Amino acid sequence: MAKDQVTKGGLASSVKESLIGVFRGTGDVSGAIIDAVSGTVTRTIKGTNAVGQELIGLLRDTARGTVQAAVDVGSDVGSAAKGAMIGVIRGTKDVSIEAIVAIRETAGAAVKGTAEVGGDVGAAAKGAVEGAIIGARDIAITAEEAANAAAKGALEAAGDVGGTAGGEVRDALKGTIGGVKVVVKEPFRSDQDEVSSRN
């Protein structure tokens, strides 16, 4: 993939188009998503030598394209977000990006991408957290750290989306997911709001 396609957001469309075929043409959608996303991330990083913000943009576009493909064909957006997260973790494990950052950004992009096409943002957030928990097995962070990074990214994105997205994501992430207690913090509330809500 050419470097200008990555920087202009062409990757999201490319991922979306290729995954629409995956959703329609395979029985093992989850495995196919993981393989497709991991392969796309790995090839694009090698082809562009993406680092820093460019690499984060690549991860966002990949997650966004994945969830949007799922919504377009009526597939489960939660499973798509989960597969995208696992694929991103696997695709970036040999690259110089902090795992927590990759997880947070991928979860946020999954939520925003889902919101852009009117999908279920709560399902996308929960799927991203599930994927982070599974993906943590392949990298040097705990399942709890991965889950909380994904939850933080999803909640921040929901705050950016606005409307009912924050409540939908918060509700979807309450409790235990994949055997891990997720700590839901509201990053889009100011400290002043928290102080006044206690009084």
Image (spheres, helix red, strand yellow):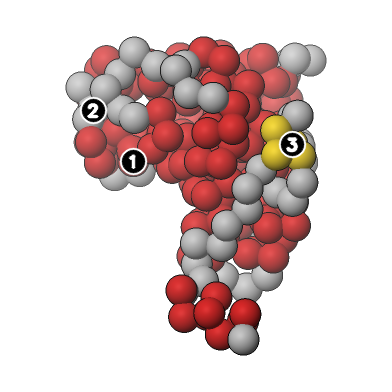
Q: Which residue is mark 2?
A: 50
Give the tally of numbered discs: 3
Report x, y in % for residue 186: 56, 62
Report x, y in % for residue 151: 58, 46
Visible in this render: residue 170? yes
* Quadrant of image for the C terminus: bottom right
Instruction: Say the numbered circle drawn on residue 91.
Output: none
Q: Is residue 15 left or right of residue 178?
A: left
Type of the residue with mark 3: Ile
Instruction: Say the numbered circle drawn on residue 177.
Output: 3
From mark 2 to mark 3, how far is it between C-alphas? 32 Å
Which quarter of the picture shows residue 57?
A: top left
Q: Is residue 95 left or right of residue 162?
A: left
Type of the residue with mark 1: Gly
Tell me which label, 3 or 1, sits earlier in the chain. 1
Tag in front: 3 or 1: 3
Tell me which label, 2 or 3, sits earlier in the chain. 2
Which residue is located at x 74 percent, y 30 percent? 178
From mark 2 to mark 1, how far is it between C-alphas? 9 Å
Tag in front: 2 or 3: 3
Of all residues shown, which one is farthest toward the front? 199
Q: Is residue 192 left or right of residue 30?
A: left
Q: Which residue is mark 1?
A: 57
Which quarter of the picture shows residue 7?
A: top left
Q: Are marks 2 and 1 in contact (CB under 8 Å)?
A: yes
Visible in this render: residue 10? no
Which residue is located at x 77 percent, y 46 percent? 175
* Quadrant of image for the N terminus: top left
Residue situated in front as seen by the camera: 35 or 24: 35
